């Protein structure tokens, strides 16, 4: 059909307006809330399940503050990885080692646009940036707290910052359980008070525990209990997570892996619980059968999902992808996990109504701690000299992150699938305001598995989790176009 000059001008004007409107729709993921024992999406009213991947490219060597390098410092790398994660259906990354003095705006904005949350560890392997398992009082001082508070300042303005971990496997055996517990509660207290006094929104603080059964249950009770029965005690963890590698091999089951025992025990939790790491790699290959259990009917009422360990292949052999220079190669574990996730009905998982379950925490008292040798004292160390001023007034200078506009979501770096073929057309698909990622948002094929990202018996996987209203503004323009 021929279009008159006037009609053509109007068409292109409307088209430009729609393009401009679409650009504004790329917004923020909904900031989640802890309600009782669950994460809840206030935009939809639904409970939220973490579908995560541990993200520390290069391992501990990938963190080098002197060189301005950490896992969220390179925008091209973040864009590539976010696109591949988006295809899988990842909605959360856990990032371990971060320098608050590096600008993370581009990477945080890329993951935000992809609908992916960030779990942030405030500690790092460097001296003065972590609490120690041995003689913890030697590492709990003002400079250490200044580092942790600076990390909080650097990431709290990003809407996709989900939570902070005050520690990771600091209690990993009975010798470390002898002295560490009061210091973990003290750090949790200090972080929560800092957020209360200096951050505009409430961001929960939790602990990531080792799944070592001789200390796991006492660690959980120590971190969740209420001192003097006060549930609003600031030293009480908002969340409890565990790094669990008990589901191993293709013959493991819900019972033999002890996942059934974990589920039964954590039913009594007064705070949300999830797997902060999982993915046993002995024997290989990994078939990810545990994901069907984690997101199944027995576990979702108790666990808020989990974080797969880990994104990049390091010496320990847990990677989903390998990186050599500027080339990323997809591994079989990526393809198998992607295929396994594609068979899960995410629409039903991510649109569940909260149980609105409130469980009273146990009272902190010595009889709560059952293991002989685990510290049963709940008198916490006082704030180190000089640190109270930081908690009251904030660190100086204050690092401050913000979501910025990303002009190009096309991946520039080379990506090869598990057969060695170069993946073309890889990009992040920006989501609308108040959306987060799930399987089907990005349908680019990346691997050798035969399941595309929106298969698995659920044709509605690509449906929106929420119904952003901004498109309503476009309807008059569309009407003009076809008038």
Image: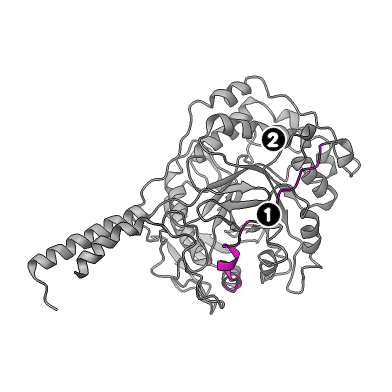
- Magenta extent: 340-364
Q: Is residue 69 visible?
A: yes
Q: Is residue 331 visible?
A: no
Q: Quadrant of residue 259?
A: bottom right
Identify the residue position indicated by label 1 in the image: 274
Alpha-carbon neighbours of circle 1 within 10 Å: few (<14), some, or many (≥20)? many
Q: Is residue 170 above or below residue 289?
A: above
Q: Which mark is residue 292?
A: none
Identify the residue position indicated by label 2 in the image: 232
**Proximity of marks 1 and 2: CB atoms separated by less than 8 Å:** no
Task: Give the spatial CA distance, label 1 vs label 2.
Answer: 22 Å
Q: Is disc 1 placed on a helix, strand or loop?
A: strand
In this picture, residue 301 sits left or right of residue 102 = right
In this picture, residue 469 sits left or right of residue 463 = left
Most common secondary structure along the magenta stretch: loop
Q: Is residue 65 above or below residue 358?
A: above
Q: Which residue is pictured at 37% across the width and 61% down the height?
A: 410
Alpha-carbon neighbours of circle 2 within 10 Å: few (<14), some, or many (≥20)? few
Residue 8, given in percent of the width and then of the height, sits at 13, 67
The quadrant in which the C terminus is found is bottom left
């Amino acid at each position: 059909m021929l279009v008159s000059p006037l009609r053509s001008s109007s068409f292109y004007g409307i088209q430009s307006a729609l393009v401009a409107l679409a650009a504004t729709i790329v917004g923020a993921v909904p900031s989640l809330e802890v309600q009782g024992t669950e994460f809840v999406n206030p935009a939809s009213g639904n409970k939220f399940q973490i579908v995560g991947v541990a993200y520390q490219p290069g391992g501990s060597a990938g963190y080098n503050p002197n060189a301005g390098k950490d896992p969220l410092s390179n925008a091209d790398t973040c864009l590539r990885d976010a696109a591949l994660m988006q295809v899988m259906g990842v909605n959360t990354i856990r990032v371990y080692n971060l320098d608050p003095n590096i600008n993370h705006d581009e990477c945080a904005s890329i993951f935000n646009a992809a609908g992916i949350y960030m779990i942030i560890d405030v500690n790092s392997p460097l001296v003065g940036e972590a609490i120690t398992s041995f003689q913890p009082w030697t590492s709990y001082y003002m400079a250490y707290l200044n580092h942790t508070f600076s990390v909080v300042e650097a990431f709290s303005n990003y809407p996709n910052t989900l939570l902070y971990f005050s520690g990771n496997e600091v209690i990993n055996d009975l010798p470390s359980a002898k002295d560490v517990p009061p210091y973990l509660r003290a750090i949790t207290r200090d972080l929560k008070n800092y957020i209360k006094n200096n951050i505009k929104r409430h961001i929960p603080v939790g602990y990531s525990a080792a799944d070592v059964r001789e200390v796991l249950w006492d660690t959980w009770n120590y971190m969740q209990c209420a001192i003097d029965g006060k549930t609003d005690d600031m030293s009480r963890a908002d969340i409890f997570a565990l790094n669990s590698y008990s589901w191993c091999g293709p013959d493991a089951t819900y019972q033999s892996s002890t996942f059934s025992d974990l589920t039964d025990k954590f039913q009594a939790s007064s705070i949300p619980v999830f797997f902060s790491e999982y993915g046993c790699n002995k024997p290989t290959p990994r078939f990810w059968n545990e994901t069907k259990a984690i997101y199944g009917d027995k576990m979702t009422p108790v666990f808020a999902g989990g974080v797969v360990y880990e994104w990049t292949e390091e010496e320990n052999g847990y990677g989903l992808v390998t990186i050599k220079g500027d080339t990323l190669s997809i591994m079989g574990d990526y393809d198998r996990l992607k295929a396994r996730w594609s068979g899960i009905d995410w629409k039903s998982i991510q649109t569940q109504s909260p149980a609105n379950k409130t469980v009273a925490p146990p009272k902190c008292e010595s009889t709560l701690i059952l293991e002989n040798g685990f510290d049963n004292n709940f008198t916490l160390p006082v704030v180190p000299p000089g640190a109270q001023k930081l908690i009251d007034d904030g660190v100086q200078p204050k690092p401050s992150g913000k979501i910025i506009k990303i002009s190009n979501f096309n991946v520039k770096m080379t990506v090869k699938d598990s057969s060695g073929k170069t993946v073309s057309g890889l990009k992040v698909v920006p989501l609308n305001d108040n959306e987060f990622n799930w399987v089907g948002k990005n349908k680019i094929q990346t691997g050798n598995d035969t399941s595309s990202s929106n298969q698995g018996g659920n044709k509605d996987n690509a449906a929106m989790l929420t119904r952003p209203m901004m498109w309503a503004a476009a309807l008059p323009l569309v009407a003009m176009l076809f008038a």
